Image (cartoon, rainbow, N blue to C red):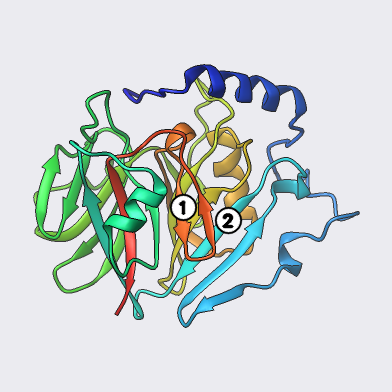
């Protein structure tokens, strides 16, 4: 994918540990989560962090080893902005300190060894990189404030004047159903994903445990939850997975050059 991990030895060890310990079968209608023991996702209540901003934890198939923090964001109350610093990538605390007034942030695009983003990124109307045409998805905000997610394969970027945008791959959920089943090169890793639900709210889904999932398993799992996702795609993960809120920080293993942030309107 063109992305590098500076802590490759650490991540390799984590992957091997996860392969040995993790028991998370790909969900299917005939393989429903075990309802004995820990509560299922449907019993979990959203925690209100602020009006229009909610949080919860999900554990695929009630796993004790794999967990995700989910933020649900109402775009009527929060503004989305992308930020890009190829010459000065930052850690989660570095990004927090560099962005006065930020309420929450996650990592965004894949990037190369020179910290240049892969795919397209638009920050306050300024375009960086080149759009994917044969892969991936795009989260965007147009100049009228409308928010959307689209796949780059059936609907490639045509140079529209967007205010903000990030791209990555693969697309995980399309029209409420799993849309990624290519297991070639798929491996266990921490994940960051972004989606939109049926009410137009934006969901950030971030590995909050050291262990993660294969992309195929994450794609299969997300439509089985009660998150109500209509469309979702994978952002950079592994050593780049990052989340900041005032009372929760998931640090990346490496500094990252691009983030997606929200601010109170």
Label 2 crowd (10 A; few <14 / some 14-19 / many >=20)? some
Q: Secondary structure at mark 1?
A: strand
Question: Dot 1: few (<14), some (14–19), or many (≥20) neighbours within 10 Å?
Answer: many
What residue is pinned by disc 1?
A: 243
> Quadrant of the rendered structure where residue 189 is?
top right
Return the residue nearer the eye: 33 or 77: 77
Is 64 left or right of 70, judged from the image as shown?
A: right
Q: Quadrant of residue 78?
A: bottom left
Mark 2 lies on a secondary structure that is strand
Residue name at image x 43 percent, y 57 percent: 195
Give the residue furthest to the right.
36
Q: Position of residue 56 (x, y in %)?
A: 62, 64
Separation (CA) of disc 2 from disc 1? 9 Å
Residue 131 position, x and y percent, is: 18, 39
Image marks 2 and 1: residues in contact by CB distance under 8 Å: yes
Give the image location of residue 35, x and y in percent: 86, 55
Residue 250, position as x, y percentages in the image:
52, 49
Residue at image position (22%, 36%) is 133
Residue 232 visible in the snapshot = yes
* Quarter occupied by the C terminus: bottom left
| Of labels 2 and 1, the one closer to you | 1
Q: Which residue is mark 2?
A: 69
Earlier along the polypeptide chain: callout 2 or callout 1?
A: 2
Vertical arrangement, residue 221 with respect to residue 17, above or below = below
Q: Is residue 67 above or below residue 213?
A: below
Q: Residue at x 40, y 38 (%)?
A: 236
Residue 175 in view (yes/no): no
- Residue placed most toward the observer, 226 or 64: 64
């Amino acid at each position: 994918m063109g992305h590098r991990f500076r802590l490759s030895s650490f991540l390799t060890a984590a992957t091997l540990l996860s392969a040995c310990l993790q028991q998370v079968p790909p969900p299917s209608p005939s393989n429903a989560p075990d309802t004995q023991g820990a509560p299922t996702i449907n019993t979990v209540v959203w925690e209100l962090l602020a009006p229009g901003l909610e949080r919860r934890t999900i554990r695929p198939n009630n796993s004790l080893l794999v967990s995700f923090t989910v933020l649900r964001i109402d775009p009527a109350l929060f503004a989305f902005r992308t930020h890009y610093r190829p010459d000065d990538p930052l850690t989660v605390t570095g990004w927090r300190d560099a962005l006065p007034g930020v309420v929450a942030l996650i990592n965004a695009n894949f990037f190369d060894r020179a910290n240049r983003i892969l795919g397209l990124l638009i920050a306050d109307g300024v375009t960086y990189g080149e759009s994917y045409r044969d892969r991936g998805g795009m989260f965007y905000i147009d100049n009228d404030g409308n928010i959307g997610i689209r796949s780059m394969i059936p609907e490639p970027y045509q140079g529209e004047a967007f205010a903000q945008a990030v791209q990555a791959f693969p697309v995980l959920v399309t029209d409420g159903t799993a849309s990624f089943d290519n297991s070639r090169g798929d491996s266990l890793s921490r994940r960051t994903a972004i989606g939109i639900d049926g009410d137009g709210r934006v969901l950030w889904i971030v590995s909050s445990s050291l262990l993660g999932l294969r992309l195929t398993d994450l794609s299969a799992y997300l439509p089985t939850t009660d998150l109500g996702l209509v469309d979702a795609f994978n952002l950079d993960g592994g050593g780049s997975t990052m989340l900041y809120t005032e009372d929760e920080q998931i640090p990346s293993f490496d500094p990252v050059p691009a983030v997606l942030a929200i601010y109170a309107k």
